[in-house]
């Protein structure tokens, strides 16, 4: 039976569009265009507008004039809000979503992956904590091949912490590291008054372990992005870079997981929707149509109090972490969003 199809908050990939879509070469250039617009607006526009309204109007106008944007959508609006910080060297730019889930429950922890350590395997709990930290930095300024394009380095860390397993000293059960280089370019293609872009990248993912629990793979991917008002979509196919075979299962070099494509699939489909300006919903899906393996992940952010936002996540299928790439489970977690989905 086909596993439930999948999608997420592009979040990785759609978030690529968030700050990448800008094409300004420097903070001074951006501020000069904004100031010129404000001066003209104060001189000639409606005198009943507040300064904040004029600044918002000018920010939208400058973005439209400098980037291949037809109408401002969910992603473009976030770009405007983060415009000042985009040029601030002391501000870290999110890549994928950042969050902490103090409670993450599963219908069955993967004890089989830790059979080499019977004490650890027998004491793993079905409730643990999870967090994700993800950042990116631009490696280029100005234009390379087209207006608004850039090259980025991104890094994402995911960690699953057996916080409630006192018997085995609360270890970090699994940590996945994902560095990547990618090229972002907006497209001059606007079906139904929408915006689009493409991302091309190389991605390495590893759990940093050795031998029996070592998991890693390398991918070359393309990511096609689309936004319309409060909806953002992403289609991300990839090609796994082949690795050499292991001579023995305990050999240090060679492919640790030669069948990972059978469970993780060959593409990811993602969507994000913002509702009433306060709630964000995401869905991410993977599928291998030959083996009928895949996964689905649903996410939701919501206001708690002040600027603090909650985050709920549901996962069903294979590959929630690298060590679980061939293990199917259902998981539900709730916690705090350190950055929005978009």
Image (cartoon, rainbow, N blue to C red):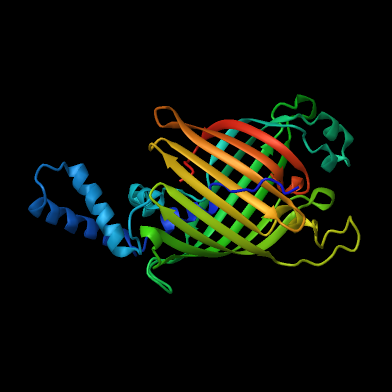
- Seen from the viewer's position, the closer of residues 249 and 126 is 126
Residue 329 vs 92, above or below: the answer is above
* Viewer can see residue 10: no
Task: Using residue 177 as the reference point, say whether residue 77 is left or right of it.
Answer: left
* Residue at 74%, 32% in the rendered image: 107
Residue 34 screen position, x and y as percent: 23, 56
- Seen from the viewer's position, the closer of residues 218 and 179 is 218
Please tell me how many numbered marks the rendered image carries: 0
The answer to which image quadrant residue 178 occupies is bottom right
Task: Using residue 167 as the reference point, say whether residue 342 is left or right of it.
Answer: left
Residue 200 vs 313, above or below: the answer is below
- Seen from the viewer's position, the closer of residues 228 and 280 is 228
* Residue at 17%, 58% in the rendered image: 36
Residue 280 vs 135, above or below: the answer is above
* Residue at 74%, 52% in the rendered image: 292
The answer to which image quadrant residue 22 occupies is bottom left
Return the residue found at the far right. 248
Residue 273 screen position, x and y as percent: 46, 44
Return the residue found at the far bottom. 145
Residue 80 screen position, x and y as percent: 33, 50
Residue 284 screen position, x and y as percent: 59, 47
Residue 126 vs 2, above or below: the answer is above
């Amino acid at each position: 039976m086909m596993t439930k199809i999948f999608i997420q908050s592009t979040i990785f990939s759609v978030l690529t569009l968030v700050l990448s879509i800008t094409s300004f070469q420097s903070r001074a250039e951006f501020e000069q265009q904004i100031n010129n617009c404000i001066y003209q607006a104060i001189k000639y526009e409606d005198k009943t507008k507040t300064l904040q309204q004029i600044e918002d109007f000018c920010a939208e106008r400058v973005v439209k004039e400098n980037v291949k944007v037809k109408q401002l959508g969910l992603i473009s609006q976030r770009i405007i809000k983060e415009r000042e910080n985009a040029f601030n060297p002391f501000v870290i730019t999110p890549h994928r979503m950042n969050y902490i889930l103090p409670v993450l429950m599963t219908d069955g922890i993967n004890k089989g992956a830790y059979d080499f350590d019977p004490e650890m395997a027998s004491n793993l709990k079905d409730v643990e904590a999870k967090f994700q930290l993800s950042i990116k930095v631009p490696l280029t300024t100005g234009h390379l091949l087209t207006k608004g394009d850039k090259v980025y380095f991104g890094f994402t860390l995911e960690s699953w912490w057996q916080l409630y397993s006192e018997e085995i000293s609360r270890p970090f059960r699994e940590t996945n590291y994902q560095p990547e280089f990618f090229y972002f370019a907006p497209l001059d293609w606007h079906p139904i008054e929408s915006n689009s872009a493409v991302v091309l990248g190389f991605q390495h993912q590893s759990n940093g372990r050795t031998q029996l629990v070592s998991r890693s793979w390398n991918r070359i991917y393309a990511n096609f992005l689309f936004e319309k008002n409060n909806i953002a979509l992403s289609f991300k196919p990839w090609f796994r870079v082949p690795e050499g075979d292991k001579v023995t299962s305990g050999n240090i070099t060679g492919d640790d997981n030669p069948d990972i494509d059978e469970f993780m699939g060959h593409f990811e489909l993602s969507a994000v929707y913002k509702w009433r300006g306060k709630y964000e919903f995401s869905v991410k899906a993977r599928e291998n149509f030959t083996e009928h393996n895949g996964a689905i992940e649903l996410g939701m952010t919501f206001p708690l109090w002040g600027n603090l936002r909650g985050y709920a996540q549901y996962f069903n299928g294979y590959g929630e972490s690298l060590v679980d790439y061939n293990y199917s489970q259902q998981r539900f977690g709730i916690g705090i969003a350190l950055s929005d989905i978009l």
